[in-house]
Amino acid sequence: MLIPASHCRVFDWPNFNIVVSQMTREQYILATQQNNLPRAENAQLYPVGIYGWRKRCLYFFVLLLLVTMIVNLAMTIWILKVMNFTVDGMGNLRVTKKGIRLEGISEFLLPLYVKEIHSRKDSPLVLQSDRNVTVNARNHMGQLTGQLTVGADAVEAQCKRFEVRASEDGRVLFSADEDEITIGAEKLKVTGTEGAVFGHSVETPHIRAEPSQDLRLESPTRSLIMEAPRGVQLSAAAGDFKATCRKELHLQSTEGEIFLNAEKIRLGNLPTGSSSSSSSSSSPSSSNSRQTVYELCVCPNGKLYLSPAGVSSTCQSSSNICLWS
């Protein structure tokens, strides 16, 4: 330690340690008092924290965040209340173990893809649309294989085969494809006033009318042909059988015979032939008035005519009618 010269004194050696120790104590006290004195000329204060406009902006953003959180919480509670969110679902939509259940009227704005749709046991299933209802079926490649369209004017089905089955035993009541249409019901009933109109041939084993109703097979402008490989049977159990045509009625059997079995067979409006001898002896009016018995004759072409009956056959003498046939 350096000691200033002004403070040096000459002491004896034994007292040197006392002098040094006193000076060191005084310097320590002086140094300590100088350090504790305030130094106003060199003092600078640095405030710690956020003050001024920064503090106001921070308070504003904190307040805005608090208001936003309150509004979001209120909107969330309102949406949960309006949409009726529960543990099982939302509103009329319920999620069950068997699938999704909708109660009441449901409206779908986009396509709906489901595996099965069915209603409750005590209510029907109603599919309603302002234009039409279309049900499509596609394969694994997304190609359209079947389509059912229910519109305001018609019901259209596009598929390879269309079938209608009975609910009890599942048998086919009606089926249609590109080749044929099959009706599997026990009875086909046509209730239209004009009957049924067929543009082409009809193949059926049995045609009958309702009880106490007439059965009419009619072709207004064309011919009516009935054919069967093993015969055609016409039966009227409780009424009359009548065949009417404008020109000719043909009964033809290629390998068999035509058998008419009745108590009475009447052929009306047959022409009557007259022999030359009877015509020369008396007038036709007097002969017709006296003649009551006639003979049925057949021309070579199959035409039937009547000839006045005599002791023997008079068909040869009255065959002049065959010349005009």
Image (tube, helix red, strand yellow):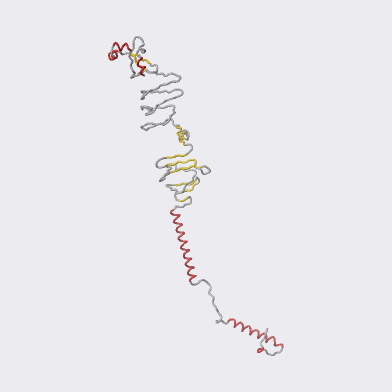
Which one is nearer the viewer's eye here, 312 or 65?
A: 312
Q: Compared with residue 213, is residue 25 higher up or lower down, i.e. above or below? A: below
Q: Splitting the image into 4 quarters, where does residue 164 fall?
A: top left
Which one is nearer the viewer's eye here, 175 or 317?
A: 317
Q: Compared with residue 193, is residue 44 higher up or lower down, i.e. above or below? A: below
Q: Position of residue 3 (x, y in %)?
A: 67, 86
Which one is nearer the viewer's eye here, 297 or 251?
A: 297
Q: In the rendered image, which quarter contains the C terminus?
A: top left
Residue at the top extreme, as displayed: 311
Residue 192 in the figure: left or right of residue 116: left
Q: Position of residue 32 (x, y in %)?
A: 61, 82
Q: Compared with residue 286, is residue 133 higher up or lower down, i.e. above or below? A: below
Q: Compared with residue 308, is residue 147 higher up or lower down, i.e. above or below? A: below
Residue at the right extreme, as displayed: 13
Q: Position of residue 44 (x, y in %)?
A: 55, 78
Q: In the rendered image, which quarter contains the N terminus?
A: bottom right
Which one is nearer the viewer's eye here, 250 or 162?
A: 250
